[in-house]
Image (cartoon, rainbow, N blue to C red):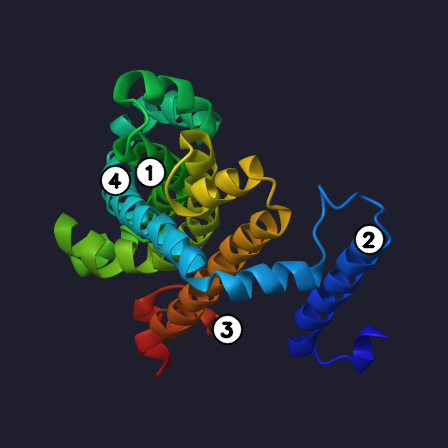
Amino acid sequence: MTRRVPRRARPWVGALVAIGIWELVAVTNAAGPQFLASVPAVARVAGDSPGELLRALGGTLQVWAIALAISFVGAVVLGIVVASLPLLDQLGEWVVRSSRSVPALALIPVTILLFGLTTTMEAILVVAAAFWPIFVNTAYAVRRYRVEHREKARALQLRRWSFYRRIVVPASAPMIASGTRAAIGLSMAATIAVELVVGYGGLGGLVLTAEQAGNTPLIYAGVLLGGLAGWLVNRLFVAGQQRLLAWAYRPGVATPLRARAAR
């Protein structure tokens, strides 16, 4: 059965099947109208209030993008510094292992106590959610290629700065991109979740207001819009990753230097 469906069409077929099951459950009132709105009802409310939904999405994307940018810069710089200094890497290993196991949302009470229900509190939590996947991947990749290409650097008499700039950091780019891709989804979910806790702004605030008003279709419209936005951002990132790091997807090529030699 799956062989008859083109590979690119399979995700869409899965989405249509999920929508069909959703509508079947809604029509039969198996979950109750107060818990599950029908597909036409959600489409109707989305068509009636596109401005409200888009404004909420814009607020969420603004906080998310700023927090992700801060996380990316901080995680990459700190990951390179820590992994390039073996002593610092060893001293920070326990801190990294213990801190990354704490979910960002578990810090909500602490950040509310320190910063109150503010945009700053929201941004800090989103930064915390996005930081660790990028940092861990960066540190692991830099550590790996620092050791793997150390002898080559000595043979080529490369200085430390040139070694990291020309070999280690470019070779680590695919793993940094993978960590960033994971951080995109985590930070998007954290942004909406924090907005639900704060109770205002973005898609989370919209969903909470709709829940308090008993507007079930609007709740699902906001949730679906957030999921669609996350999927679209992920697809755009993957397309950019494959274009900018095309050398990493060639068989037998592990670093940009090998890619140049293979041409």
Sequence order check, earlier mark of 4 and 2: 2
* In the depicted structure, whether residue 163 falls above or below residue 136: below
Distance from Cα at disc 4 to Cα at disc 1: 23 Å
Say whether residue 128 is left or right of residue 192. Answer: left
Closer to viewer: mark 3 or mark 2: 2
Q: What residue type is labelled 4?
A: Ser
Task: Classify mark 2: helix, strand or loop.
Answer: helix
Q: Residue at x 30, y 76 (%)?
A: 260
Say whether residue 14 is left or right of residue 247. Answer: right
Q: Which residue is drawn at 41% across and 54% down?
A: 57
Tag 1–tag 2 contact (CB < 8 Å):
no
Q: Which residue is drawn at 63% across and 59% down?
A: 42
Q: Residues within 10 Å of mark 3 (few under 14, many from 20)?
A: few
Which quarter shows the C terminus?
A: bottom left
Q: What residue type is labelled 1?
A: Val
Reading the image, the residue beneath label 4 is: 84
Q: Residues within 10 Å of mark 1 (few under 14, many from 20)?
A: many
* In the depicted structure, whether residue 66 falls above or below residue 242: above
Query: Would residue 175 be visible to someone looking at this image?
Result: no
Reading the image, the residue beneath label 3 is: 251
Tag 3–tag 2 contact (CB < 8 Å):
no
Reading the image, the residue beneath label 2 is: 25
- In which quarter of the view is residue 22 placed? bottom right
Which quarter shows the N terminus?
A: bottom right
Q: Which amino acid does label 3 sit on?
A: Pro
The disc at residue 127 is 1
Sequence order check, earlier mark of 3 and 2: 2
- Residue 68, horizontal then vertical, whole percent: 32, 47
Sequence order check, earlier mark of 4 and 1: 4
- Residue 74, horizontal then vertical, whole percent: 25, 41
Closer to viewer: mark 3 or mark 1: 1
